[in-house]
Amino acid sequence: MLDNSPPRVRSGAKILHKLPDQRTCSFLLTRYLESIQELVFSKFTTRLIAASLWSTYDKALREPRRTDALGRISATICKNAESPLSEVDDHEAWHASFLGTNLRWECLGLIFA
């Protein structure tokens, strides 16, 4: 599947392959969030993003990870990045705009931080 994909989708699949398993990710994220000040996203929102990532893509992110499954996730995230986030006043609508299947690369970057 990835052979015919755009380079950014192939790169995204490689990034997703580097993501630690859920248990390790949760441990590292908890340690990280305990040691930082809230700057861009609140700690609550960062935890929501991580929880959403695993609840939405758990099956595809389980080991052993399949390149074609990671490619589909990457393609979805790349498509989401093609449109700007809408300005909303409601925090639930704001969260919904980048959680679940609306995940964006910048949100995934918080998990890697």
Image (cartoon, rainbow, N blue to C red):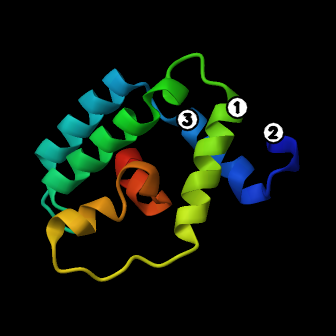
Q: Is residue 87 left or right of residue 43?
A: right
Residue type for callout 1: Thr
Quadrant of res 7: bottom right
Precedes in sequence: disc 3 or disc 2: 2
Tag 2 secondary structure:
loop
Crowdedness of circle 3 by 10 Å Cα count: few (<14), some, many (20+)?
few
How far is the residue under mark 2 from the one under mark 1? Answer: 8 Å
Q: Residue at x 59, y 16 (%)?
A: 64
Residue wearing tag 1: 67
| Residue assigned mark 2 | 1
Residue drawn at x 35%, y 65% is 97
Quadrant in the rendering for residue 53:
top left
**Position of residue 29 measured from the top left corner of the image (x, y, whole percent):** 26, 39
Kind of residue sitting beneath label 2 = Met
Percent of width and height locating residue 110: 35, 53
Q: Is residue 63 above or below residue 90?
A: above
Q: Is residue 1 left or right of residue 25?
A: right
- Marking on residue 18: 3
In front: label 3 or label 2:
2
> Is residue 25 visible in this depiction of the protein?
yes
Task: Check contact, mark 2 vs mark 1: CB within 8 A.
Answer: yes
Closer to the eye: label 2 or 1: 2
Q: Secondary structure at mark 1?
A: helix
Report whether 68 appears left or right of 3.
left
Could you give the CA–CA distance between mark 3 and mark 2, rounded to whole angstroms? 19 Å
Mark nearer the viewer, 3 or 1: 1
What amino acid does circle 3 point to?
Lys
